[in-house]
Image (cartoon, helix red, strand yellow):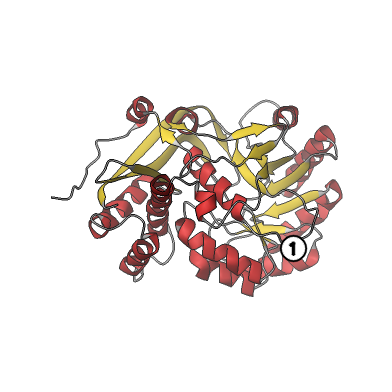
Amino acid sequence: MIIKEITPYVLTSKLDEPFYFSQWQYDTRKICLVKITLEDGTYGWGEGYGPADVIKAGIEFFRPFIVGKNALENECIWQEMYLRSLDFGRSGVFQAAVSAIDVALWDLKGKILNQPVSVLLGGVKNPEIHPYATGLYFERCENLEKKLVDEALGYKAEGFKAIKMKVGLGIEQDTLYVKAVREAIGDDVKLMIDANHAYSYKEALELALNVEKYNISWFEEPVSPEDYDGYRKLRSRTSIPIAGGECEYLKHGFKRLFDNDCVDIAQPDICATGGFTEVKRITSLAQTYSKDVVPHTWGTWIAISAAVHLVANLDKNPGRMYSDKPVMELDRTENPLRDEVVKHSLIIKNGVLTVPTNPGLGVDIDEDALQKYSCQANTKIFIK
């Protein structure tokens, strides 16, 4: 089970319809994937969340220390990467490179042992999941309110039982759009809001108090990820559950969130915060603090499938005979890299996602599409 080859790919695709949120505009999707191949030809796929070119450089940094190792010893490999980057990469993009490699190793482990990752994580405690539609980004159009309402109604028609929308344009506008979307979708669909840390504590509190009456399931990243005090104060002043953590790295980052009592819902990104190996530790830590876990997901079906297998394994919090199905994020924005490059085994019907039983992550790559969207030639290292 010796690792022979590690190949990162940077893929890019120009969008037909640019969109934006509280911080930036997107007119292009760009992502870093990694393929790890063993001596016998078995391979696994991983993905990193963040600046793709930088993640690729991180993978290339780690590659000489990993080639030649036993792919089943993922914790040993993880520790090697962690210690190699500790002095300068305790958080940030280096951890996304660690994550991409780790996810690929878990995909490999599943294929080697002929088991889905969810089983290898400890078992499928949640065979069915309610994905929520992430969309309702802003566009430069004549009537943004109508665009948001129409999009939300489309997700409801598809069977989604929960929708997350963006806020962060200003308190007055946000309140108007939240009201319009809630009135359009009715009370039988959950609605979450995500500010992408656009607000100060006082602004976030004003918005929260404005929209509490619209039955908001959570307020995501209301303030800067560095404003732990703002998170804590906001959580104590609103009835809306507070979510965050996509900008945190490793269990140490989430311990800071929990020690400061910042969130009700922790949102580690498997492809950024250390891969399955570290997120499994984060979920145990979250349970210790009685926090829910809903992983942040943004990318291809590799990242989405990774989130499915993690959520399938999450503990009940708390346990009871009849409990709600867990939720997870499903990005619905335009993304050819997701829909053309990656083949997957996920089945979503009437708003319910059934956990797949294929070995590994249950994903593969369309090689033609991979080459179509690749940015540059990729280098490889082989065992001699």
Q: Nearer the viewer, residue 253 or 73?
A: 73
Residue at x 50%, y 39% (from the top left corner): 358
Q: Nearer the viewer, residue 360 or 213?
A: 360
Q: Position of residue 197 (x, y in %)?
A: 61, 55
Crowd rating for badge 1 (residues with CA inside 10 Å; few <14, some 14–19, many 20+): few
Residue at x 63%, y 36% (from the top left corner): 138
Q: Is residue 39 above or below residue 201?
A: above
Residue farthest along the left direction in this orientation: 384
Q: Is residue 213 left or right of residue 31?
A: right
Q: Position of residue 217 (x, y in %)?
A: 76, 50
Q: Is residue 40 left or right of residue 305?
A: left
Image quadrant where residue 148 sits: top right
Image quadrant where residue 77 sits: bottom left
Q: Position of residue 345 (x, y in %)?
A: 53, 34
- Dot 1: element: loop
Q: Nearer the viewer, residue 320 or 305?
A: 320
Residue farthest along the bottom direction in this orientation: 259
Image quadrant where residue 42 sits: top left
Q: Nearer the viewer, residue 133 or 227?
A: 133
Q: Is residue 265 left or right of residue 98?
A: right
Is residue 123 visible in this depiction of the protein? Answer: yes
Instruction: Name which residue type carries label 1.
Output: Pro
Residue at x 80%, y 61% (from the top left corner): 238
Is residue 273 visible in this depiction of the protein? Answer: no
Residue farthest along the front direction in this orientation: 114
Q: Position of residue 352 (x, y in %)?
A: 69, 37
Q: How many marks?
A: 1
Q: Which residue is mark 1?
A: 318
Residue at x 50%, y 49% (from the top left corner): 117
